[in-house]
Image (tube, grey):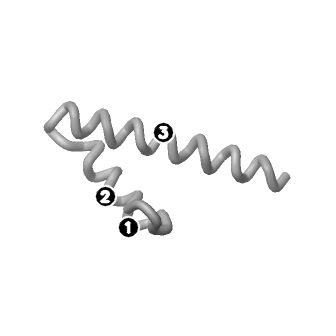
Amino acid sequence: MAGEELSEEHIDKLVELAGSDNDETAKAAIDLLHDISQVTTKSVEGYV
């Protein structure tokens, strides 16, 4: 994923992984989704 643009497909995959039965996988996906939301929020705030 490095060097790629973050797409809706990537987000969908992370959401799918967040529901994983594997606790480690689920936690990692949730942490990434949280980080992405923080970066997105800060980016939007920069334009306002």
Residue 40 on image: x %, y %:
62, 50
Q: How many marks?
A: 3
Which residue is at the front of the view, 35 or 4?
A: 4
Q: Which mark is residue 34?
A: 3
Q: Residue at x 70, y 51 (%)?
A: 43
The mark nearer the N terminus, 1 or 3, is: 1
Which corner quadrant holds the N terminus? bottom left
Residue under label 1, please give it. Answer: 9
What amino acid type should be assigned to the residue bearing mark 1? Glu
Say which amino acid is labelled 3: His
Left or right for 44, reference 29: right
Q: Residue at x 48, y 63 (%)?
A: 6
Q: Secondary structure at mark 2?
A: helix
Image spot of residue 22 (x, y percent):
15, 36
Q: Is residue 15 above or below residue 3?
A: above
Reply above or below: 7 against 34. below
Q: Position of residue 2 (x, y in %)?
A: 41, 60
Question: Which badge, 2 or 3, comes first in the chain's sequence?
Answer: 2
- Residues marked 2 and 1 touching at CB (< 8 Å): yes
Q: Secondary structure at mark 3?
A: helix
The CA distance from mark 1 to mark 3 is 17 Å
Residue 34: where, in percent of width, then height? 48, 39
